[in-house]
């Protein structure tokens, strides 16, 4: 009978007792007698191994499980690597796409910067300098409407006006830098002097000399400012004509500014936005035309397959620009003509009551053109000079750009060196082919009313 408890129960480590290969059995010496031995049962236990009944299956399953774990780890690592690589590739593609234009933008900028160094070029400021000068482009430093800020340079204490020309803009950079180069090589007393520029952080900034005495529109249309005398007004118009003639090429002033020398080899620059708010007045009420050569793009009329882009401010935009979208020096002449009428009459180009150009034309037809004079002058003006400005305003705003005078011609008329040309009796005879469908002056004005709401948002 098998005992309930084993007769021998001992913990023995076979490592130091058994060899790798050995026989198990009974041996003994009984002399001449015989003995019979029977092995009733046999058990063997070891630590760390499973029961004999499951050992074979466990032995085969363990390597398989380990292989699966290793495979899962390898696959997971590979997937993570692939995902990271794809993410980095996508970011690189987006970055390259977003800044490829910027790279070209700055490469072109560096090219023109090197060319600027060949001339009497303005200073190249760092963004950090201008940021500090404008107190971080603080809203309190803004000069009127737009993105122009008053600043004080920390190194010299000079007061400047910093204009944000474009932010993240690439188109037109070459043109702007070329104009900076040209204007720097030939400064003019009636243009706001350029002090420098900056091209960093995706922004193009122009630094002008700060003109302390506000803009012309404040003196014309703000009751809180003193009324400009007639001599001041006429002097301002002569200065503006001189500055625009210089921009359009061919005019250098000498001495007191009354002697002009013409040079047709000078480059032609177009202002594109002549209006009273862009005319600064210094302490002696000399006119300084600012914001010159810097394009103002206004989306005025959109269709599915066409976008017309206008440059300028509604009320000062020439009719041919509305029709063709193209800007020439004669578009500047038109804007100047509207400004001249504003200075002479003290009225805005457009108001709820009247369109200034229509009003002056009507008074001229009635032989009452002097009635358009600013009432605040109380009759204190030179009659011939007043007539000169009013007729000159009409002459510069003729519908056909080919019949408008050049700015050099205008300057000579103002100085009395050239007689005033006769005005046409009808506008119909003056219309170019592009405006042939407009039969009279009254139909010119409605043609300017394309997308008025968008244009007035300037």
Image (cartoon, rainbow, N blue to C red):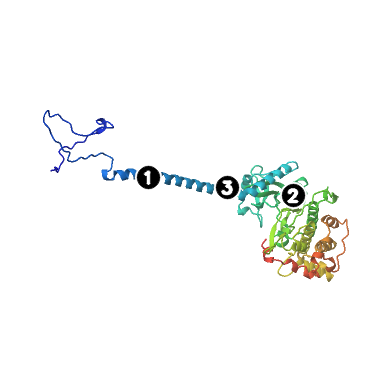
Q: Position of residue 381 (x, y in %)?
A: 81, 62
Q: Closer to the N terminus: mark 3 or mark 1? A: 1
Q: Which quadrant of the view contains residue 74?
A: top left
Decide: is 272 above or below 365. above
Q: Residue furthest left?
A: 33
For mark 2, what is the residue?
179
Give the spatial CA distance, label 2 vs label 3: 35 Å
Residue appearing at x 74%, y 46% in the figure: 181
Kindly tell me whether residue 410 is visible in this rendering: yes
**Left or right of residue 48: residue 457:** right
The foreground one among 267 and 151 is 267
Dot 3, how many residues are within 10 Å of its Cα: few (below 14), some (14-19), or many (20+)? Answer: few
* Callout 3–callout 1 Cβ contact below 8 Å: no
Q: Quadrant of the N terminus?
A: top left
Dot 1 falls on a residue whose secondary structure is helix
Give the spatial CA distance, label 3 vs label 1: 42 Å
Kindly tell me whether residue 256 is visible in this rendering: no
Q: Quadrant of the C terminus?
A: bottom right
Dot 2 falls on a residue whose secondary structure is helix
Q: Closer to the N terminus: mark 2 or mark 1? A: 1
Q: Which mark is residue 92?
A: 3
The foreground one among 336 and 115 is 115
Q: Which mark is residue 64?
A: 1
Q: Position of residue 43 (x, y in %)?
A: 21, 40
């Amino acid at each position: 009978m098998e005992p309930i408890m084993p007769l021998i129960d001992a913990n023995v480590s076979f490592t130091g007792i058994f060899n790798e290969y050995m026989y198990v059995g009974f041996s003994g010496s009984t002399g001449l007698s015989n003995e019979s031995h029977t092995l009733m049962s046999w058990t063997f236990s070891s630590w760390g191994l499973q029961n004999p009944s499951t050992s074979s299956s466990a032995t085969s399953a363990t390597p398989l499980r380990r292989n699966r774990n290793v495979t899962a780890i390898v696959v997971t690592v590979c997937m993570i690597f692939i995902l990271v690589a794809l993410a980095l590739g996508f970011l690189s593609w987006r970055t390259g796409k977003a800044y490829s234009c910027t790279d070209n933008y700055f490469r072109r900028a560096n090219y023109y910067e090197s060319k600027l160094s060949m001339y009497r070029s303005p200073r190249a400021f760092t963004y950090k300098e201008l940021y500090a000068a404008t107190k971080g482009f603080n809203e309190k430093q803004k000069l009127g409407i737009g993105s122009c800020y008053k600043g004080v340079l920390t190194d010299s204490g000079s007061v400047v006006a910093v204009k944000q020309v474009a932010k993240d803009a690439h188109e037109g950079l070459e043109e702007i830098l070329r104009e900076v180069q040209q204007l720097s090589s030939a400064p003019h007393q009636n243009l706001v002097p350029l002090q420098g520029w900056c091209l960093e952080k995706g922004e193009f900034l122009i630094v002008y000399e700060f003109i302390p005495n506000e803009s012309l529109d404040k003196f014309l249309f703000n009751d809180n400012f003193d009324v400009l005398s007639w001599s001041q007004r006429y002097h301002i118009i002569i200065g503006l004509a001189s500055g625009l003639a210089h921009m359009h090429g061919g005019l250098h002033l000498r001495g007191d500014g009354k002697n002009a020398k013409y040079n047709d080899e000078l480059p032609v620059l177009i202002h594109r936005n002549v209006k009273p708010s862009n005319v600064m007045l210094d302490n002696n009420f000399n006119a300084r035309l600012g914001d010159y050569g810097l394009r103002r793009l206004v989306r005025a009329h959109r269709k599915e397959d066409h976008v017309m882009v206008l440059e300028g401010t509604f009320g000062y935009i020439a009719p041919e620009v509305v029709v063709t979208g193209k800007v020439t020096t004669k578009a500047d002449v038109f804007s100047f003509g509207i400004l001249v009428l504003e200075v002479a009459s003290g009225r805005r180009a457009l108001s709820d009551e009247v369109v200034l150009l229509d009003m002056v034309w009507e008074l001229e037809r009635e032989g009452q053109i002097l009635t358009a004079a600013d009432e605040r002058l109380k009759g204190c003006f030179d009659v011939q000079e007043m007539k000169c400005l009013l007729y000159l305003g009409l002459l510069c705003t003729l519908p056909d750009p080919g019949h408008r005078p050049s700015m050099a011609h205008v300057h000579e008329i103002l100085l009395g060196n050239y007689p005033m040309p006769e005005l046409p009796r009808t506008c119909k005879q003056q219309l170019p082919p592009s405006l042939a469908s407009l039969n009279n002056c009254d139909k010119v004005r409605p043609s300017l009313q394309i997308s008025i709401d968008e244009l007035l948002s300037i």
